[in-house]
Image (tube, helix red, strand yellow):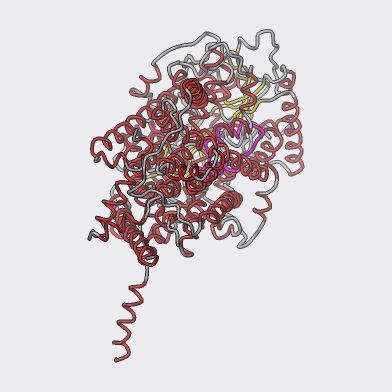
Amino acid sequence: MKDSVSLIPVLRKTLGRVRWSGIVLWVVLSLLVIVPVTIFLAAAISPRLLRVGPQWFTLHSVYEAFTGYTGRGIINSLWVSTTVALLATTSATTLAWLVTRTNFYGGRFLGAMMWVLLLIPTWMMTVGWSNLITPGELATALGINTTQIFHAFYGPGGIILILTTAALPFCYFVVSAGLRGLGSEFEDAARVHGAGASRMLRTVLPIVAPALLSAFAIAFAESISDFGVAFTLGANTHFPMATFTLYNAITENPANFSVAAVIAGVLILCTVPPILAQARVTRGRSYAVLSARTRSVRRYQFQPLTRVLVSVSTFALLTLVAVMPMVAAVATSFTRTISFETRTGIHWSTFSYRQIFHPPPSITSLGNALGISNQLGVYVATGTVILGYVLAKRLAATRGGWSQRIADIFLLGSVAIPGVVLGVGYILFYNQAIIARHVVSLYQTMPLLIMGLIAAAAPGQARLLMGPVAQIQASMAEAARVHGAKRFRTWRTASLPVLSRTLTWAWVLTFTKTIAELAVAQMLLVPGHEPVSVMIETTLGTVFAPIGTAATVLVLAEMLGVIVLVLGLYRVLTPKGWRRIGEVGSLR
Amino acid sequence: MTNTTNQKGSFGFRSMTSAFGVSIIAATIVVASAGAVPVAHSTPKPVVQLKLYSAQGYDSYVVDAFNASQSAIHVTLNDNSTGTLLTQIAAEQASGNPVWNMMWADGATWAAQFDKAGWSHKNILPAGVNFNAAGLQNLPSNKSFVPTGLTVTGGLCYDTASTQGVTLPSTFAGLVNLPQGSLGMNNPSRSGPTFPLIAGQMAHLEGLVSSTTRSANAAQIAAAIAKGKNFLLALKAKGLQVHNTNGPTLGALESNPSTLSAATIQTSACYGDIAAGYWPTGAVKYLDYSVALPSTIAVSKDVTPAQYAAAKTFVAYVLSVTGQHAMQDGDPQGDGLFWPVINGVSPEAGLPSYSETHAYAINPYIWGPLQNDIDTWFTNNIIY
């Protein structure tokens, strides 16, 4: 009795030391990602575990995945993703420097262009390029012979171009957030000590290393897991990509989950080297440069002619790679034909748009589908921003233990999980008889779809938030605490103002991405409540493809409207000071 | 000082983690409880619920019409692409808790695979169905699936303008004589009707009799596959272009300038574009044979007796005059362009008689299990 009494304080003390918050976080991550994906990956070596083969243990699928075109797909995905990550990070850093550190014309407009690029899914971008350069499409109508470009496009060149364009805004926002938070005192200090331009760059760039490495890592992971471009371009070329061979394996009849699991495992493992590189560079060092005393920057002044030339050439290039494909898609949506120019000419018409609102019986109404997608967007964006912020805080901690390192590897690995794998993993786990019949039946319900979409979005968002979060100096929170603020007030008054812009961006980005997301939505949709992405994809594959294209344009317009609305609300509702913090370079 | 900093940093992180972690869990639970089905509290419903997985353009129209005609049965539709639906079903089967009740898609090879895997119910044909000859030909002996309509794949869709001066072949063998790079087809890994076309070419080249039930020995099948592969390689040598699905193939045919002059695809897609006015210079020519492509329904073997009876009621509706008309009305320029499988219903205007298609039937139980191997060969040798 005496012993048991003395145990209570010990137990209390032990329990008090437990980091419950960390445990809760890992439980959430387990339910969202770890368990469903692990179950799917188990099929790689144990088909019988999932009733997809007779063997309890076999390496046959591993051999199969690395031979033939599946093996080539893995190799191709690796070098393409590395190239894309390098190109995107370099280009984004150049653009971010131009906007935040020089007298470049149209910085705000460039930021808006990045937003537009960010919300366009790769499959939509590919459709746009096809609408532009395929013989018989817009460029042909403008008198340009695109035959050579068309054939060159359907290969690694086209894939790299589109993936780089897609990764560019991710990298731009991460790097520009880092540069905005960096006052010019570091550059001044380098110059005062006699550094030239090159030496000064070598001094300053490492300070934004978390942002640069985040940009590289996320571009690599997003590229290697991208399905849209592999599905649309890779499938029609002699150039297999891993995501496409994975999809082929999953949609075979009967489905070859084992080979798909091997490919998925390889994709996830491929993200480890960039993370380790990032960890090696950043571990144990502090990159917190954003404090209450951060000063405004002095911008590099181009000569007038150079300024015009740099600005015009930058926008011309961006217009070519980002705007023209969308213009082609919009133009095509205003014709009544599948191809823009037919042998009987161009048939301009608003028929497809009218059909959206008065659809034939075989097509789901756009209004219903869009309503469902908007609901999903609100839930998923809110959940993702909360979870992403918590994860970013964990990743950004300078003294993390094993838990942080695992979280680090796990999170970027999760970015590389193709949505279709997540979707199938969710069915395999949440539809297990023991769970569905005795705990809760979540399959084909909105909650499971929301969970799946959050699981798909949160790792990427955490990566995006990590850069800005890492730059907040602890001194600000310390100051608040010294002045008697409680925990929540400390966060609200010290962190929230600094991060409010980033968090708002993250919310809007997740919202728009959710509306365009296809792979998870297809697998986990609630019958009778198809999201708009599924409705469009279904329509594009039929005789009503022009209606699908028109619906795509309207959805894009809706996304833009939401962005304008949310950012407008942010401007109206937040104190002026919030909007200036973290943007010291824009005070002029 | 250092210690103080660490404590504060740790404190900030932990507080946030705690607050938001709990928020996430709470939100998940709230959302889950709002929309999930709590098993312990579920109550039996008087109406028999059926989940229909379908990739047919007319499915929602037919389901609405059926539900309107029934008070004791309610069908919920999962409308998706064939590949996605098959993946969902495979995952459900692997989880040990299949929730699909009926599957409806083009082709019979998937349905034969379901039967061989033991996933589908046998004897799902209701009494009183008045099949025509084509319908009967596509009905398996164990009635583990039923045909609901017929289209054909492998007719020659061509553009009359871009083939001016070109002598179109009248046989499949003659396709190798088309000008270099002018012929197209779809990718069997992405296009449902394309594997049956390839299987039909192989079977026909070996001289197998047109039948959905007649078996063939291993030597005949091996010879058929070898001849079919050689034929496809010969087409590739003549610049065969492979697009994913009907949409891109038709786009390549219809553009100006066109990148394709002719393609062997599902002819209903060509008729659809012509009827919709998208392709005024389009036309269809039938060669020495095309391959019959029935749309089929299968029923899960895991349905309850009440659901089994309800599923047969649905099948009976689809195979009635009313049901066949609903299929036509539900997608008149798309999947509704089929040849009915029962007597007393005419195909839509614009379709030729079924006999003009020289439809050739394959045994799905022979060719279904070979699909993955042949698709992989096609991907490795014709596409890549």
Asked if residue A314 lies left or right of residue B375, the reply is: left
| Rendered image quadrant of residue A78 | top right
Residue visible at 38% across and 37% down? A585
The x and y percentages for residue A545 are: 47, 24
Q: Nearer the viewer, residue B369 or A538?
A: A538
Residue A313 visible within the image: yes
Frontmost residue, A389 versus A100 = A100
Total numbered badges shown on the rendered structure: 0
Quarter of the image with the C terminus of chain A is top left
Most common secondary structure along the magenta stretch: helix
Q: Say which quarter of the image contains residue B218.
A: top right
Left or right of residue B234, residue B67 in this image: left
For the point 35% across and 46% down, which residue is it?
A446
Q: Nearer the viewer, residue A141 or B141?
A: A141
Above or below, B107 against A408 in this view is: above
Q: Which residues are magenta?
A: A219-243
As displayed, is residue A230 above or below residue A30?
Answer: above
